[in-house]
C-alpha cells in the first residue's frame, strides 16, 4: 500500500479502490450492517418525506455537444 501514499498526501487515482478493498478484507462495519438491514424498506417513506425536483432539469455542466462549436 506504499504506492497509495503520494508525496503531498493527496489521494491518487486508484487509492480509493485500494482503500475500499482493504476495508472489505478487514471486515468493513458498513458492509456488515448492510448485510443485516434491508435499507430499501426506507426508500418509499424517505421519498415521500423528502420530495426531489425534476432531475431532468438539473443544473450542471453543459453537454459537450452543446458547448463545443467545433463538434
Image (cartoon, rainbow, N blue to C red):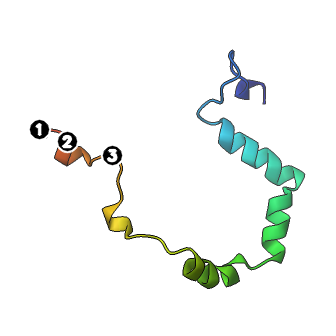
Foreground pick, 3 / 47: 47
Q: Secondary structure at mark 2?
A: helix
The answer for how far apart the CA atoms under marks 3 and 2 are is 9 Å
Residue 29 x %, y %: 86, 59
- Residue 40, quarter of picture: bottom right
Q: Quadrant of residue 3?
A: top right
Q: Is residue 12 left or right of residue 31?
A: left
- The residue wearing badge 1 is 69
Q: Position of 10 compared to 24: left or right?
A: left
Residue 13 horizontal/vertical position (percent): 58, 33
- Residue drawn at point x = 17 percent, y = 39 percent: 68
In the image, is 1 to the left or to the right of 62?
right
The residue carrying mark 2 is: 67
Total tally of numbered discs in the picture: 3
Q: Secondary structure at mark 1?
A: loop
Residue at the far top: name it: 7
Please, what secondary structure does the residue beneath circle 3 have?
A: loop
Amino acid at each position: 500500500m506504499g504506492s497509495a501514499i503520494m508525496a503531498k498526501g493527496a489521494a491518487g487515482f486508484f487509492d480509493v479502490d485500494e482503500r475500499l478493498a482493504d476495508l472489505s478484507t478487514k471486515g468493513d462495519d458498513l458492509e456488515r450492517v448492510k448485510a443485516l438491514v434491508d435499507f430499501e424498506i426506507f426508500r418509499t417513506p424517505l421519498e415521500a418525506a423528502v420530495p426531489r425536483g425534476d432531475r431532468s432539469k438539473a443544473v450542471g455542466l453543459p453537454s459537450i455537444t452543446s458547448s463545443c462549436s467545433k463538434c
